Amino acid sequence: MNIGSLLPRHARFRGDHTALVVGGHRLTYRQLDAYVNRLANALLAAGLKKGDKFTTVLPNCLELMASYWAAAKTGIVIVPSSTLLQASGLATLLNDSDTALVIADAQFTDTVAGIRGELPLIAGGRFVIIGGDGGGHPGFRSYEDFLAGASEAAPPDAGLDDGDMYNIMYSSGTTGLPKGIVHSHYVRAMYCMIFAQSFRIIPESVVLHAGAIVFNGSMVDLMPWMFAGATYILHEAFDAERVIETIATEKVTHIVMVPAQIIAVLNHPSFTPEKLASLEMLQNIGAPLPLPYKQRINAEIPGCFYELYGLTEGLMTILDKHDAVRKEGSVGCAPMFMELKILRDDGTDADPGEVGEICGRSPCLMPGYYKRPELTAETIVDGWLHSGDAGYLDEDGYLFLVDRMKDMIISGGVNVYPKDIEEIVIQHPAVLEVAVFGAPDEKWGEVPVAAVVLQPGESVEAADLVAYVNERVGAKFQRIADAVFYDEFPRNVAGKTLKRQMRDAYGGG
């Protein structure tokens, strides 16, 4: 079972079906297969072999997508990196992953050249630049030169089996020690089958992805797309108006977005429910979508809202569109072949409705963190992945996410979950987005602070917003101490709000 067999199969049996639309390209499966073969053969010609690593430093583009499937065919391991990494972080990732070749966009040429001396594993000629010639830097070459002479024929059989490594996904933050999450061909094959079934992706589906495909959340539609032989439309960058118009003109059936993207689409002047009428799935991922937006989707575009909670390490729940109203506020249940439980601090099973740590096991479970066996052993205990997130199961086994345990605020010895407060703040008519974090306090240890982005054209005084929230929260310890305003929140490449960055920048008020 290796995912490298999927593309050639579609090229043979559905060769004229539209496979990929990106950057002015509209490729059939036969054309995409030939293009991927050229890249696969070029990687092999550069001296890479099964098990070697190559890193991409690319925005959404044809070359990045081809890199995923060239890796799948050759057994060369792909390490997709965030384009938001600073030079030092990129150097750390390249060395930690044992990268032997880099494919980078021209805009990162100087960044890569500046750390060249820190990368002893990468030989000359293995710095490949897309959209440029390397700017005269020694050992750099253009992508066109790299592909020159490479055959469109299938590369040699790599002898892959389902236990072979496919990729290393690094945690999506922009700072901190590297944490490379390994996925095998088996794990990705489970993504293919489980998510295709869960989301009802079939050969006639049209999938639109407008977020970066370098983070693992993109794999929940990318893998089932290829498994089913559907059509995948990839936007180079997120633009709410373009998303709306693409859904309308291409009759898109499936889309995955993070909360900020969903909010931007729903609040865009060009949005109408009719333009999104073709959607069979509008899925939220990455963080909980505020309840008012879930209710709006279910009212205006009924029968399409899904929500996925998951960890790159291999724990997921899915809220099916048929449960979206019945189980409002839940992030769903474990898909087939996956198990979920809530543990108390002492390791015993929590009762229904009791908050504890979310743990799970599944066929999507990572083999481990790359070169970090101690961390792997701390995270996976007796086959169960410990998420570090807090939640509870209802009597029916549906998960309700309380909060990321790392974001939990301890105020006066009481656990305060930001999500509970955020659901109050978002109800203020002037508020577009909210993120609640804990700020240091001499008396209480920590106190909640609300960071907000306001609706266009709206204004509100911090004191008035604080009063509004504190009149409505359910407990005194949930009262916010301050409100701060952002034009837009800091986010990582996955679109997740960086609360830690906001907390570090907060100076008090």
Image (cartoon, rainbow, N blue to C red):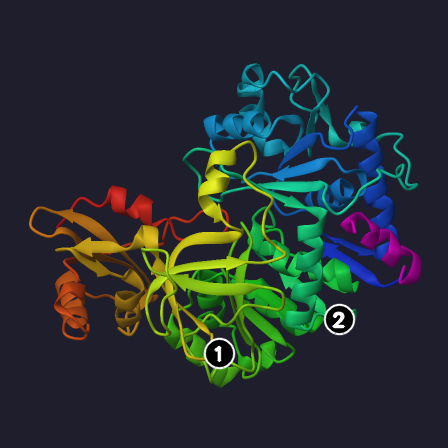
Q: Estimate the x, y position of residue 453 in percent, counting from the top left.
A: 32, 60
Find out whether residue 11 is within the magenta segment: yes
Closer-to-camera residue (77/211): 77
Closer-to-camera residue (186/98): 186
Is residue 470 visible in the rendered structure shown here? yes
Q: Quadrant of residue 432?
A: bottom left
Mark 2 against mark 1, which lies toward the viewer? 2
Is residue 496 visible in the rendered structure shown here? no
* Magenta-tinted stretch: 1-15
Q: Which residue is mark 1?
A: 297
- Which residue is pictured at 53% across the width and 79% down the height? 272
Residue 286 sits above or below residue 69 on the image:
below
Q: Which residue is mark 2?
A: 202
Residue 422 sits above or below residue 119 on the image:
below
Find out whether residue 40 is within the magenta segment: no
Mark 2, secondary structure of its residue: loop
Residue 494 sits above or below residue 82 on the image:
below
Task: Residue type at mark 1: give it.
Answer: Ile
Position of 2 with respect to 140 (left or right) is right
- Which residue is pictured at 64% across the width and 17% down the height? 137
Closer-to-camera residue (190/220): 190
Mark 1, secondary structure of its residue: helix
Q: Quadrant of residue 418?
A: bottom left
